[in-house]
Image (cartoon, grey):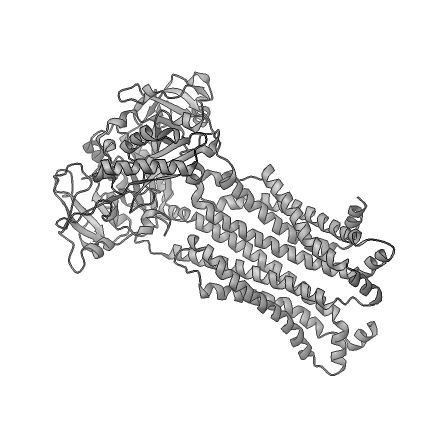
């Protein structure tokens, strides 16, 4: 306690040193706390289910795709034959239209899920109220039932227990509410209503073994079974199915991973990189404060020497200095926590909007324990080396016999070494920030192939119970487009399925008519979109060859297709694709006539570059006429002539309700906003790395300035003698500046080696930027060089003002 009281008094007596050291540590510790709290929320915190580490997600993979949805017949075989799981369920996220039985509420579209009856029990959850699905509820022809979320129960029904037995209209089908599932269920995301598979189990498309209709498998490992064993078990079953069903299961394998990894694994590498970046910032801050501590300890050399002469042991002296470091670390940690709390909202704003765990970031007990551990480590890093150096017998003897505050050459070399380390780490962070900035810029500049300006987007999902024929679906959308087209301020309107940046993927294999059959599992694939005739005009996509869809491309007429230029170049080289044929892959009729190619349009970018399977594989795209292949769920696109497309949202909603009072719209947005949100993961990495690189630059420059300024002070006599013997002021300036820049140069060389190694770790989060990108490295060196030059110039300039007479008189 005596040491602590004395340390506090010493820090109060030196407010400049205390504030600078405390701020440096606060920035380092605060950055680490903030990023750890994100890593903890996203990657480390267990899922809110009992024994969540035993929950796994199962998907399929093939030669073409590393990730595919699950075939329903394959799921049935897995469930029967596996020996690794207590049970397996299927789940598929769906957008559901919701209204009440008496029509006393405005219809809304909500997030829902279609699941097998055993889903909740596999997740380890029981209903908050009512009962779970039974196997009887999940059979074709069973009574229609639903489970609702705790949140929907509170919002729509005020949390009343009498909700059990009431009816909801879900996609135009009355369903009895049999239970309320707990808020802990967060998979799929934003789920408010769960309905059983029941009626879809008998659909012909679902029963096709080669149809992967959006389902994921969820299973719970048996006690004692490892993930590796379960993976091998399912792989054996998949190989057996390949032998039994070669037409559909050739090259089909399984992909098994923990549910946590399935949910957030895409962000693991980027967050680990950010954690490494803040560790570098902390090391720079600690090196900075250690240099300040040593300089201050040297100035207290006589005091420590007198203490030693009066009987203080080396450990007693070191403990005194470590006490000061500990107090600094505690103060820095406290201020760092405030910085972390302040930055939490900013990090959440940069995070992907559709990943809830990013927005659950909080400074909890685990984050505080981490902060305390970082503060303890920082106090040791900051204090142990200066304490060790200053408490040596040689240092104390020297202090008793020297009248100045000159330090030994070894101490100067150690301080210089710390500066070199700071500069090297700063270069690593600056180069990494430059690479991610260039990657983000390249991703933004990648041609879209369409013009997103002024386009309002909204999702419409027609319930199959009411729109049960292609004719009804086509009629609704035809009338809607006519009504919306007549609204003031609308210059064009269209519908599309799988439009750019709508967070969906729809691909299908295809075969050019008249060419040899594709080898199963190894044929070409393309993105599939169903669009209305005005789609290309609304999207600003020119018709490069042929024509757009017209009145002749309707149901009952020969089916047509429009392809993008990448498909034309690859499969119809040196020939005109117009009039060529592609087998119709959007029908179950094996004898259907082929599609006729009527147009070629530009290739569009439908997702962030390199972000999903289709973008990575550079799939071409095929467009079908929405009138010939009606789809119940579409994105409505409205081109606005005004500056604010959102102003059209309410008039468009009124037109939808005028056609069908029970039909809601959802996900109202703008195409430009959708594109911006799709880049959120890259923006988060770029912004935070940039901030950390800026902190590193400031801290490294402060450290360099401190060492140079202390060096000038310690060399006052030497500089005075040089000037007394005739040295010009510019020579003294060059001497001091040159020594500082020599340290910077050495740090830059070491930093470039580290930056090259770090850039290879960044490869997975970069787009169209190589690991050795010379412009990014050059800008990092330039930024550091300018700041370092200023940090060295100021002490060098001060050295030229040394008065030789005063310097010699002081000695």
In the image, is residue 57 above or below residue 443? above
> Is 653 placed left or right of 161 in the picture?
left
Residue displayed at 74% across by 54% down: 15
> How many marks can you see?
0
In the image, is residue 737 above or below residue 701? below
> Is 685 placed left or right of 704 in the picture?
left
> Is 670 placed left or right of 626 in the picture?
right
* Residue 486, image x, y percentages: 26, 41
Q: Quadrant of residue 191?
A: top left
Residue displayed at 29% across by 49% down: 539
Residue displayed at 50% across by 35% down: 46
* Residue 168, image x, y percentages: 35, 22
Q: Closest to the observer: 520 or 425? A: 520
Residue farthest bottom in this picture:
726
Q: Is residue 257 visible to the viewer in this orientation of the structure?
A: no
Q: Closest to the observer: 583 or 122? A: 122
* Residue 110, image x, y percentages: 38, 31
In the image, is residue 630 above or below residue 8? above
Q: Quadrant of residue 794?
A: bottom right
Q: Is residue 123 visible to the viewer in this orientation of the structure?
A: yes
Q: Closest to the observer: 287 or 783? A: 287
Q: Quadrant of the N terminus?
A: top right
């Amino acid at each position: 306690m005596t040491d602590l009281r004395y340390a506090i008094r010493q820090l109060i007596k030196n407010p400049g040193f205390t504030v600078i050291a405390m701020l440096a540590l606060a920035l380092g510790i605060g950055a680490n706390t903030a990023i750890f709290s994100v890593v903890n929320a996203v990657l480390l915190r267990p899922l809110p289910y009992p024994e969540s580490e035993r929950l796994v997600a199962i998907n399929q993979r093939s030669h073409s795709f590393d990730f595919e949805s699950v075939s329903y017949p394959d799921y049935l075989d897995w469930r029967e034959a596996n020996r690794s799981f207590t049970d397996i369920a299927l789940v598929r996220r769906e957008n559901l239209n919701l209204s009440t039985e008496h029509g006393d509420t405005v219809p809304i579209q909500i997030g829902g899920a279609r699941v097998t009856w055993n889903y909740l029990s596999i997740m380890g959850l029981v209903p908050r109220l009512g009962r779970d699905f039974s196997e009887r509820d999940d059979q074709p022809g069973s009574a229609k039932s639903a489970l609702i979320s705790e949140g929907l129960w509170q919002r729509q029904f005020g949390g009343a227990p009498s909700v059990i037995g009431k009816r909801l209209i879900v996609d135009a089908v009355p369903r009895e509410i049999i239970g309320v599932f707990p808020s802990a269920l967060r998979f799929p995301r934003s789920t408010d209503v769960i309905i059983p598979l029941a009626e879809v189990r008998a659909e012909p498309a679902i029963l096709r073994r080669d149809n992967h209709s959006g389902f994921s498998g969820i299973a719970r490992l048996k006690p004692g079974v490892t993930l590796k064993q379960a993976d091998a078990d399912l792989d054996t079953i998949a190989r057996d199915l390949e032998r039994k069903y070669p037409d559909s299961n050739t090259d089909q394998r399984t992909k098994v991973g923990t549910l946590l990894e399935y949910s957030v694994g895409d962000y693991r590498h980027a967050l680990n990189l950010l954690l490494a970046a803040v560790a570098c910032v902390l090391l720079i801050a600690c090196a900075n404060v250690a240099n300040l501590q040593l300089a201050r300890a040297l100035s207290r050399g006589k005091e420590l020497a007198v203490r030693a002469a009066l009987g203080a042991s080396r450990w007693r002296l070191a403990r005194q200095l470590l006490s000061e470091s500990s107090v600094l670390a505690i103060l820095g940690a406290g201020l760092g926590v405030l910085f972390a709390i302040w930055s939490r909202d900013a990090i959440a704003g940069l995070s992907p909007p559709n990943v809830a765990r990013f927005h659950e970031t909080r400074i909890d007990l685990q984050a505080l324990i981490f902060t305390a551990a970082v503060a303890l480590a920082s106090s040791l890093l900051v204090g142990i080396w200066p304490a060790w150096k200053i408490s040596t017998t040689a240092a104390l003897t020297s202090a008793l016999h020297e009248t100045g505050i000159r330090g030994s050459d070894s101490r100067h070399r150690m301080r210089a070494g710390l500066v070199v380390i700071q500069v090297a780490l700063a270069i690593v962070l600056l180069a990494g920030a430059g690479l991610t900035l260039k990657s983000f810029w390249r991703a933004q500049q990648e041609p879209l192939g369409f013009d997103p300006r002024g386009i309002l987007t909204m999702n419409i999902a027609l319930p199959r119970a009411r729109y049960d024929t292609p004719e009804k679906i086509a009629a609704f959308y035809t009338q809607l487009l006519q009504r919306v087209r007549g609204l003031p301020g609308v210059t064009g309107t269209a519908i599309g399925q799988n439009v750019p940046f709508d967070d969906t993927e729809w691909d299908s294999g295809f075969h050019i008519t008249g060419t040899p059959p594709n080898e199963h599992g190894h044929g070409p694939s393309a993105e599939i979109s169903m669009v209305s005739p005005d789609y290309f005009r609304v999207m600003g996509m020119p018709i490069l060859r042929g024509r757009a869809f017209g009145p002749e491309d309707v149901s009952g007429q020969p089916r047509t297709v429009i392809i993008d230029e990448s498909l034309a170049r690859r499969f119809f080289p040196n020939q005109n694709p117009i009039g060529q044929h592609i087998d119709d892959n959007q029908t179950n009729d094996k004898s259907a006539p082929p599609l006729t190619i009527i147009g070629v349009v530009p290739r569009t970018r439908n997702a962030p570059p390199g972000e999903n399977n289709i973008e990575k594989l550079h799939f071409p795209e095929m467009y079908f006429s929405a009138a010939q292949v009606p789809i119940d769920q579409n994105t409505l696109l409205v081109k606005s002539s005004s500056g604010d497309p959102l102003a059209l949202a309410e008039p468009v909603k009124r037109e939808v309700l005028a056609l069908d009072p029970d039909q809601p719209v959802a996900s109202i947005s703008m195409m430009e906003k959708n594109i911006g949100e799709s880049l959120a993961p890259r923006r988060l990495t770029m912004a935070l790395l940039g901030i950390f690189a800026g902190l590193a630059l400031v801290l490294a420059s402060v450290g360099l300035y401190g060492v140079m300024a202390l060096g000038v002070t310690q060399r006052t006599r030497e500089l005075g003698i040089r000037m007394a013997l005739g040295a010009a002021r510019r020579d003294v300036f060059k001497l001091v500046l040159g020594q500082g820049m020599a340290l910077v140069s050495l740090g830059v060389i070491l930093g470039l080696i580290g930056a090259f190694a770090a850039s290879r770790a960044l490869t997975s989060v970069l787009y169209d930027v190589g690991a050795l990108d010379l412009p990014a490295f050059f800008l990092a060196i330039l930024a550091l060089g300018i700041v370092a030059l200023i940090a060295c110039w100021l002490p060098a300039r001060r050295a030229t003002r040394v008065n030789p007479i005063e310097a010699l008189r002081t000695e």
